Image (spheres, rainbow, N blue to C red):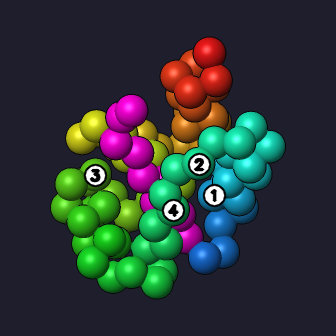
Amino acid sequence: MKDYKLYVGTVCRYCKKVEDFMKENNIEIPLVNINEDRDAMIKLIDEGGKRQVPCLYHDGKYLYESDDIITYLKENLLG
Protein backbone atom coordinates (compact mmCIF):
# COMPACT_ATOMS: atom_id res chain seq x y z
CA MET A 1 0.00 0.00 0.00
CA LYS A 2 1.27 3.42 -0.93
CA ASP A 3 1.74 6.18 1.63
CA TYR A 4 -1.24 8.53 1.30
CA LYS A 5 -2.33 11.71 3.06
CA LEU A 6 -5.01 14.21 2.07
CA TYR A 7 -4.38 17.80 3.09
CA VAL A 8 -7.65 19.66 3.62
CA GLY A 9 -8.93 22.95 5.01
CA THR A 10 -11.67 23.63 7.55
CA VAL A 11 -14.01 25.43 5.16
CA CYS A 12 -13.23 24.23 1.65
CA ARG A 13 -15.92 23.03 -0.73
CA TYR A 14 -13.35 21.30 -2.95
CA CYS A 15 -11.97 19.41 0.03
CA LYS A 16 -15.52 18.37 0.91
CA LYS A 17 -16.02 17.15 -2.66
CA VAL A 18 -13.00 14.85 -2.38
CA GLU A 19 -13.94 13.73 1.14
CA ASP A 20 -17.48 12.89 -0.02
CA PHE A 21 -16.12 10.88 -2.95
CA MET A 22 -13.83 8.97 -0.60
CA LYS A 23 -16.68 8.27 1.82
CA GLU A 24 -19.01 7.08 -0.97
CA ASN A 25 -16.32 4.70 -2.23
CA ASN A 26 -15.02 3.50 1.16
CA ILE A 27 -11.58 4.99 0.58
CA GLU A 28 -9.76 5.63 3.81
CA ILE A 29 -6.88 8.07 3.63
CA PRO A 30 -5.64 10.05 6.64
CA LEU A 31 -6.85 13.66 6.56
CA VAL A 32 -4.58 16.49 7.65
CA ASN A 33 -6.32 19.79 8.31
CA ILE A 34 -3.82 22.57 7.65
CA ASN A 35 -5.99 25.05 9.58
CA GLU A 36 -5.59 22.95 12.71
CA ASP A 37 -2.01 21.74 12.21
CA ARG A 38 0.46 24.55 11.54
CA ASP A 39 3.38 22.14 11.06
CA ALA A 40 1.42 20.30 8.38
CA MET A 41 0.70 23.59 6.61
CA ILE A 42 4.39 24.49 6.65
CA LYS A 43 5.32 21.04 5.34
CA LEU A 44 2.74 21.32 2.55
CA ILE A 45 4.16 24.69 1.50
CA ASP A 46 7.81 23.63 1.80
CA GLU A 47 7.49 20.28 0.07
CA GLY A 48 4.40 20.68 -2.10
CA GLY A 49 5.20 24.19 -3.20
CA LYS A 50 1.96 25.92 -2.25
CA ARG A 51 -0.71 26.26 0.41
CA GLN A 52 -3.53 24.91 -1.72
CA VAL A 53 -6.03 22.35 -0.57
CA PRO A 54 -7.17 19.77 -1.25
CA CYS A 55 -3.81 18.19 -1.88
CA LEU A 56 -3.20 14.47 -2.10
CA TYR A 57 0.23 13.38 -0.95
CA HIS A 58 1.24 10.00 -2.31
CA ASP A 59 4.71 8.47 -2.25
CA GLY A 60 6.56 11.77 -2.10
CA LYS A 61 4.38 13.52 -4.70
CA TYR A 62 1.76 16.22 -4.26
CA LEU A 63 -1.38 16.31 -6.41
CA TYR A 64 -3.65 19.36 -6.38
CA GLU A 65 -7.14 20.08 -7.79
CA SER A 66 -10.16 18.13 -6.56
CA ASP A 67 -11.08 16.68 -9.96
CA ASP A 68 -7.50 15.48 -10.54
CA ILE A 69 -7.43 13.90 -7.08
CA ILE A 70 -10.74 12.11 -7.68
CA THR A 71 -9.52 10.86 -11.06
CA TYR A 72 -6.32 9.58 -9.45
CA LEU A 73 -8.28 7.81 -6.71
CA LYS A 74 -10.61 6.20 -9.27
CA GLU A 75 -7.73 4.96 -11.39
CA ASN A 76 -5.43 3.82 -8.59
CA LEU A 77 -7.64 2.75 -5.69
CA LEU A 78 -10.90 1.60 -7.24
CA GLY A 79 -9.63 -0.31 -10.27
**Whether residue 53 can be seen here:** no
**Disc on the earlier residue, 4 or 3:** 4
Measure how far apart labels 4 and 3 are at the Cα level: 16 Å
Q: Give SS at disc 3.
A: helix
For marks 2 and 1, give the one nearer the viewer: 2
Q: Give SS at disc 2.
A: loop
Q: Which residue is mark 4?
A: 31
- The part of the image, by quadrant, that contains residue 46 is bottom left
Three-letter amino acid code at disc 2? Answer: Glu
Q: Farthest top residue?
A: 79
Three-letter amino acid code at disc 4? Answer: Leu
Q: Quadrant of the C terminus?
A: top right
Instruction: Out of 28 and 6, give the one closest to the viewer.
Output: 28
**Disc on the earlier residue, 3 or 2:** 2
Measure how far apart labels 1 and 4 are at the Cα level: 10 Å
Q: Which residue is mark 3?
A: 48
**Disc on the earlier residue, 2 or 1:** 1
Q: Which residue is mark 2?
A: 28
Instruction: Out of 68 and 57, give the one closest to the viewer.
Output: 57
Measure how far apart labels 3 and 1 are at the Cα level: 17 Å
Instruction: Identify which residue is drawn at 28% across, 51% down.
Output: 48
For marks 4 and 3, give the one nearer the viewer: 4
Three-letter amino acid code at disc 3? Answer: Gly
For marks 3 and 2, give the one nearer the viewer: 2
Instruction: Out of 7 and 25, give the one closest to the viewer.
Output: 25
Q: Which residues are magenta?
A: 1-9
**Disc on the earlier residue, 3 or 1:** 1
Q: What is the x, y in percent for residue 76?
A: 52, 22
Measure how far apart labels 2 and 4 are at the Cα level: 9 Å
Three-letter amino acid code at disc 1? Answer: Cys
